[in-house]
Image (cartoon, rainbow, N blue to C red):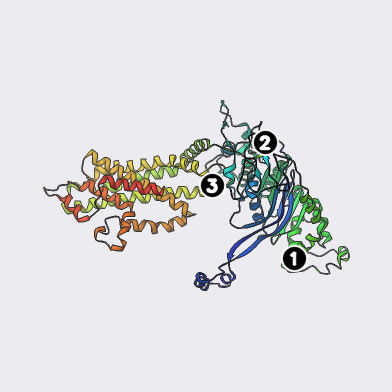
Amino acid sequence: MEHSRPLQISFEGLSYSVRVPSKGAANDSNGILHAIKAPFSRNKYQDKEILHSLTGTFRPGRLTAILGPSGSGKTTLLNLLAGYDSTGTTTGNLWVNGRPTSGAGLRLLAGYVNQDDVILPTQTVSEAIEMSIILRPPPLANSSSDFHGSSGGSDGEITANAQPLLPAPVTFAGGSSSHGESPRETLPQIEEKHPTANSNGKKHPRCVQAIDTFGLDKCKDTMVGDSSEKGISGGEKKRAAIAMEWVTQAPILFLDEPTSGLDAHAALSVTHHLRSIASTGRTVIAVMHQPSSEMFEIFDDILILCEGHIVYLGERAELIDYLARLGFPCGMYTNPADHVFNSVLFDSSAFRRDAANVGAIADKQAAVPSSTAERARLLIDEWHKSSEAAALKESVDAPDLTPIEAKQLRRISSWQVQTKYLVKRATRNALRNKMVVRIRIAQGIILGLLIGLIFLNTQNRPASVQTQNFSGALFFSAAAQTIISILSMANVFAHERVVFIREWRGSYYGLPAYYLSKNLVELPVQIIVPILYSCICYWPLGFQRDGVKFVIFMVTCISLNLCGYSIGMLLAIVCKTMSAIVAALPLVFVPLLLFGGLFVNTGNSTVWLRWIQWLSPIKYAFAALTKNQFKGYVVDGQPLGDQYLETMQLGPFSIAVNIVFILGIGLILW
């Protein structure tokens, strides 16, 4: 592994609070009283402090484990440092090698591994790692300019032609960056080519190295999989997620519970890999959940949080002696991590204080508090008075001032490279989801056959039956094409939502590249399905045997599919889960259906609700299809079609204008 120039993270007085409903809402078990009072209350919300004035430092070349009970603020601190928490209020100071920055600034220097390993299920392990290399290429070898700045917060500058490294409050030569600036906007873009494979078809050398380093050779060509499609194991998935961050050569690595859900061997293996990464000079900080004694011995430093306060931050080897001084000696064969949870942070009936140690601290702690709140207050107070806390404060005040190299800044590919790769990945994802592709194609074929057989040879039936059958078939075509398109697109986007958010926040790509690539891959399917439907149902059903009218029928169905495609995407964006989409769909679809032109004569409907018809693409599609079929349609010498159109009152717009309105609605929602 390549060695990295050390980066020391320091923070002082770091606090974080969020707005929560006032106590009145919490005391109202039913929430009814609060719901009535809320609009008239001046104090609807109050601040809840999650982190309380934390001061400490994370040193480079060391693996720091963050321990603490649930709700102590471990993940909040990690997300705050990594620039992933923006909903609350943050106060305090944050530095990197003595240079003031923010969480957004650290985000440009750090990799982040989520607790849930979110990787596209249809990607293989090697493809996932290569994606990280292509979209977030490692720094160029000749990019060696340094960032110079003072720990006192004075202006800094970047030598050579490097991009701004850290967002506010650092000011750079030639301009400044605002405190709220998105880190994605300041990441330098790479125009150089970073091939995924050599000319002989071999994988990228960096990918091969990562697979070897993290022991992924056996599963490198296996799809990641998910709950419905078996793939790699949990340990392999966790190592793959870490490898995806490792290949970017980020000098700082944050991990949220990287061993959760793994067996003892897999968890120990992951911890060894983290220690190996730290040995290259990188700063590795991981939230750990119930580490084993073997894992505990691998850690270099330990941070213990309790109720949002630091109760210990220092070397792992000194933790046992520190706790013993407080009257919490650890047994010889006891896992120190279990001791911290069972005997220090919480009272355990199995714990008995060592009589030899009681005498030394009898004046200070005649009895250890049994309640959790009292214990927490004791540990917090003792930490603030300890020599370890004083030494930690000195290291914060005298940080490592090693210049930060511009090449340590994480990089992203240009949007052209992003789009090209994402189109390739989306195509591969669609082809590997064979069942989904087959079902979507089958929808067009089966529905076409169904409607064609139900209304077979309608042109040979009595005039009244023809009117009813043609109208039903046309309205069904409009409604079916809309709902099928909405559901198919909502399903696709809803299932990829979590993957997109994780990759977008990880600076793999920008929103335009993802959106464009998704449209380029999905739109052909949205065109093919209505074409199949039209070809299968139009002629057997008995519509007018005119090539132009057939093309108009098909174009209308395609337009309606594209409009439904936009509605489906909008639902997937607004609703976070597929269950929420299914719940919201009737609220959207039923009004469009009711004012579609068949159930209600829109020309004579309720005046103050009549405007809804102009929002319904089904109405425009039904109007276009009906006029296409019935205009000039004659049965037994009678102008049946024109009479029917006059009765339906489908509006003054021509077929072409109705189709344009359908596409316009789709474009607006797109």
Estimate the x, y position of residue 317 in percent, counting from the top left. Answer: 81, 51
Q: What element does badge 2 sit on? A: loop
Q: What element does badge 1 sit on? A: helix
Q: Is residue 157 visible?
A: yes
Amino acid type for the residue under numbered disc 3: Val
Residue lying furthest top in this view? 200
Marks 2 and 1 sit apart, C-alpha to C-alpha, by 48 Å
Residue at image location 35% in from the left, 58% down from the top: 590
Q: Which mark is residue 499?
A: 3
Left of 426 or right of it: where is 208?
right
Left of 244 or right of it: where is 454?
left
Q: Which residue is mark 2?
A: 159
Estimate the x, y position of residue 129 in percent, counting from the top left. Answer: 59, 38
- Mark 1: few/some/many CA within 10 Å (<14, 14-19, 20+): some
Disc 2 versus disc 1: nearer the observer: 2
Query: Of marks 2 and 1, which one's residue comes earlier in the chain?
Result: 2
Left of 95 or right of it: where is 224?
left
Marks 3 and 2 sit apart, C-alpha to C-alpha, by 37 Å
Q: Is residue 335 visible?
A: no
Q: Which mark is residue 377?
A: 1
Amino acid type for the residue under numbered disc 2: Thr
**As drawn, 108 above or below 34:** above
